[in-house]
Image (cartoon, rainbow, N blue to C red):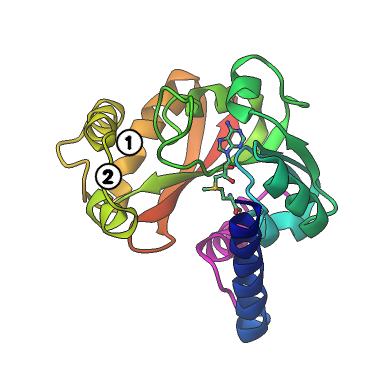
Amino acid sequence: MIIKKLIYVRKSQFSKWLLSRIFKKRVGTAMQTMLQTLSANHMLPKNLIALELFGFIGTNATMDYAHLADYIEMWEIDPFFAKEAQKYIPKARVICGDSIKAISNGGLLRKDYNFIVIDPNVFMHNYVSFESFGIFGHALKYVAKDTVIFVNIFNNVEEYIKKYGANERIEDWIKARKEFFAIDNVVSARGIDYLKGFEKIIKAEKLDIVYSNFISRNEYVGFGVFVLKKC
Ligand SMILES: C[S@@+](CC[C@H](N)C(=O)[O-])C[C@H]1O[C@@H](n2cnc3c(N)ncnc32)[C@H](O)[C@@H]1O
């Protein structure tokens, strides 16, 4: 199991390194593109106080914004991944623990994050909800006056199943998506159609949405990006 994880971790690190060599200073990932776009539109806070709730080893998201951050609090439940993350992103404060519990019970270290990344798996062990549905609302209690949120959105369930295969929880997942997004097509709708589900929760928290968009990361998942203002 450890060998399998080690190979997985090294593979992620190698492909990230390779990408950075190929693209050099040019934009590579969806997050990098979006960060440049937000910055060009003066919507990116200057010094990021970042909260990343599902960190892995930082290769898919954290690395893209770490250089812009004054503070990074990264949660990762798997001790092996957490240790790698700390080595890989030394400036991060990596906490090996359950971020779902922490965000629900007031266990996070601060209350003023201006940059929040929510990038969970679809199905989580011991987790009664799916994707970010059960925690997105909680995250809004920890925002600064001006905050950017990146949350993953599975925009194409068919493509996801093609890649990872079906399992016995797919039906429940689709049902949860119908409730959360309140749209007819929760299998392969347009990326932007999924934003409304999050926007409804943001509005209920009385936060202003300065900007929102969907940016694709691959054929089945992207980021919903929200620029928020607390009045
Ligand atoms: C999709 S990956 C995140 C990718 C990450 N954003 C990156 O930059 O590479 C999800 C990660 O969340 C971790 N995880 C799952 N449940 C968790 C929980 N309750 N608290 C903290 N981390 C969790 C998993 O171990 C996995 O590494």
- Nearest the camera: 111 or 82? 82
Q: Is residue 100 above or below residue 228?
A: above
Tag 1's secondary structure? Answer: helix
Most foreground residue, 40 or 63? 63
The type of residue carrying mark 1 is: Lys
Confirm if mark 2 falls within 8 A of ligand 1.
no
User: Disc 2 marks which residue?
Assistant: 193
**In the displayed structure, would residue 56 be above or below residue 131?**
below
Number of callouts: 2
Q: Are marks 2 and 1 in contact (CB under 8 Å)?
A: yes
The structure residue drawn at horizontal position 50% and vertical position 19%, both measured from the top left corner, is 205
Q: Where is residue 54, by image quadrant?
A: top right
Q: x%, y% of residue 51? A: 68, 38
Which residue sits at x=52%, y=44%?
119
**Is 32 included in the stretch rendered in magenta?**
yes
Tell me if 60 is positioned left or right of 224 in this view: right
Residue 171, horizontal then vertical, whole percent: 21, 33
Residue at far left of view: 184
Q: Residue furthest bottom?
A: 22
Q: Residue at x 67, y 83 (%)?
A: 21
Element assignment for label 2: helix
Residue 79 in sight in this render: yes
In the picture of the structure, the residue carrying the numbered disc 1 is 196
Task: Say which amino acid is labelled 2.
Answer: Asp
List x then y, in percent, for residue 141: 61, 21
Residue range (magenta): 26-47
Q: Does 100 sit left or right of 51 as displayed?
A: left
Residue drawn 66% across the image and 66% down it: 10
Q: Where's the C terminus, which quadrant? A: top right
Ligand 1 rendered quadrant: top right
Q: Position of residue 164 (x, y in %)?
A: 34, 54
